[in-house]
Amino acid sequence: MFRHSKEGTSYSLNRKIQKNLKQPKTNAHVPRDLKHNSFPKRYDDMEIRTLSPAKILFFPLFLLLFASQTIVGCSPATTGETNTEPSTKESTTEPNTEPNQQEPTVTDASTVDEKGWSEATHGKDAEPDYETVFSLKKVHRIDITISAANWKKMMDDMTNLAGTFGAGNGQPGGQPGGQPGGGPGGVDPAAMIQACKDKAEGDACEVTINGTTTKGTCTQDQRANAVVCMVSGRPGGQPGGQPGGGGDLIPGDPVYVPAKLVYEGRAWHDVGIRFKGNSSLSSAWKGGSYKIPFRLNMDKFEDDNPDIKNQRFYGFKKLVLNNGFSDDSLMRDLIGRELFAAAGVPVARVAFYRVYVDHGEGSKYFGLYALVEDPDGPMLKEQFKNHKGNLYKPDGTGAALASFVQDDMVKKTNEDEADWSDVKALIAHLQADRSDAAAWRQGLEKIFNVDRFLRWIAMANLMVHWDTYGSMTHNYYLYADPGDNNRIQWISWDHNMVMMNMGGGGGGGGRSATQLGLPNVDAAQWPLLGHLIADAEYRKTYNKYVEEFAKGPFATDTLVARIKEVHTMISPYVVGANGEQPGYTQLSNAAAFNNSVETLKAHIESRQTAAAAYLKTQ
């Protein structure tokens, strides 16, 4: 007997037959002439009691025919989704040759031939297929189908959380009011800079927080290379001041709903999907852009539909689709990832995906997204010695690591175990006596992978990664690796605003040479950064890595060549007839994307100049 999902879809019989035949990779499937939407949601919906004798005789014969076709492997036909556009099966490596309209429409994902369930593509025990999912040889395509009722549920929920769609001060370009977001208490960092324009350090200022104008003081922020308005009585958001936080522009997580995904001809049913993000989500929502970031959970609805229990996407359970907030190049997530990986820092994989969404009005191109793996998944097994340790995503005052705040040290693994002893030990040691520097270093290195953190500091400061520890109390993970004596490892996260100054735009003129040396870090507020950079031995290691990375992965010619390569690959899906369209983009304008290579090149050159000048002083 069939089992039915919330969306009225099923491939359980297909899956069971394949398992019974011990052919996990077969392409056998449910015949597509059994239209998904025609499946009843409950067995009693079949109304068997009202069937005529002829229908009763026909039904078992139909089931017998159905099973025989499935076992033998029938030829696929189309699904019964509502969109009836003809199939124009599109390669994932070539641009769509159809001109987009104002609201771009394409072939409905439901018309593609859906291959069957297999262990390698859908099963829990499959090895994570990084080569397929995160290939950088092409721009991928994924199609998402959400019922009209569930789309309304998502939109209504967001309206309750953030107000009416398109009624705020956001605008395309990923910047509320044209500025990059993510500052403390919901303040846009560039708005903090603007508030102190033509003012001196120490002058009074006013800045708007969530629609309310609040008084503050103009304060020098070395990461922003600017004087910024720090709000009185609130987090400051800069080294030398109070630690800043992301601020909850969206109070709580948006609702999950079930959806169907189609990728490379295969379908995944009842996948959990929701809107995600803070500044990135708030900006898109308030600005009326449907290029909204998403979070995917492959088996979120397994309790409602047991046939998708432990469903995976080529070995991955959780994935994130970032919308390129505040990044006119749409490359920073990837380039930042590659630079940190080259520096020897643990970091999630990234790939480019064209995302098409059908929420009851036909499939539309929502834009070019960066698919990012969730650290709570195969990444722990791939990049660490043991994947069963505690993973934390710090967020809030406690993320400064000056004191332990349990609510701010959010566990992403082992959530049912009330054990924070590993991170508590790190925070306690940062407050320990440092009069015997060698003993203090030895103790720290037993509980924390210092070398990886120094690598992260060097690359982060070289490229300018200000929206993270040292300026903001978010955008990093900590992992206690049982395979490394439970030492805590630093994981870099969220790189859409790297390689730009806090004023946004990503132009040149980065921090001065002395600022690369972080002379004004307040160790009382940022102890992990402050104490390490103040230690003579660790400073030597930091300097070594700054020089090594400036000559290596961050070298101008090497990095600019890579940026040009990526820009060329993604351009057809960003600008032009087949690119992002009004209402489905975060770009400030097409020219900003077209000029982004030169913009990033100027920034790289300015950082090289700063690094050379700094190293001469050491």
Image (tube, rainbow, N blue to C red):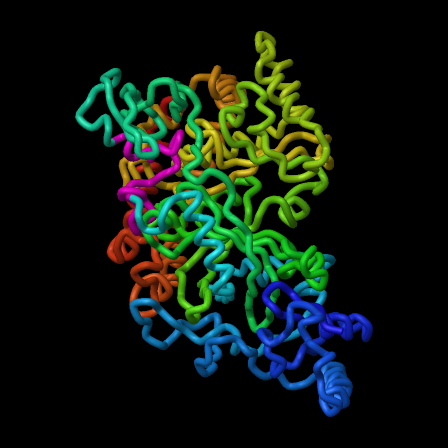
Is 114 on the left or on the right of 53, as rendered? left
**Residue beneath the point at 28% across and 44% down:** 169
Is 433 on the left or on the right of 23, as rendered? left
Callout count:
0
Residue 231 % position (x, y) = 33, 22
Residue 469 % position (x, y) = 47, 30
**Residue beneath the point at 44% across and 63% down:** 354
154 or 95, nearer to the observer:
154
Specify start and end residues of the magenta stretch as a single range.
Answer: 169-193
Would you place residue 192 above or below residue 281 in this image? above
Question: Can you see residue 9?
Answer: yes
574 or 69, nearer to the observer:
69
Residue 378 % position (x, y) = 65, 50
Q: Find the residue positioned furthest to the left.
A: 198
Would you place residue 254 above or below residue 466 in this image? below
Task: For the N terminus, give its image quadrant.
Answer: bottom right
Q: Find the residue positioned furthest to the top.
A: 435
Q: Is residue 190 magenta?
A: yes
Question: Can you see residue 597?
Answer: no
Would you place residue 531 above or below residue 371 in this image? above
The image quarter in which residue 73 lies: bottom right
**Residue beneath the point at 53% across and 51% down:** 295
**Residue beneath the point at 42% across and 20% down:** 242
Is 302 on the left or on the right of 585, as rendered? right
101 or 132, nearer to the observer:
101
Residue 292 % position (x, y) = 42, 53
Task: For the C terminus, give its image quadrant.
Answer: top left
Would you place residue 521 above or below residue 307 in this image? above
Q: Is residue 518 magenta?
A: no
Q: Find the residue positioned furthest to the bottom.
A: 54
The image quarter in which residue 291 lies: bottom left
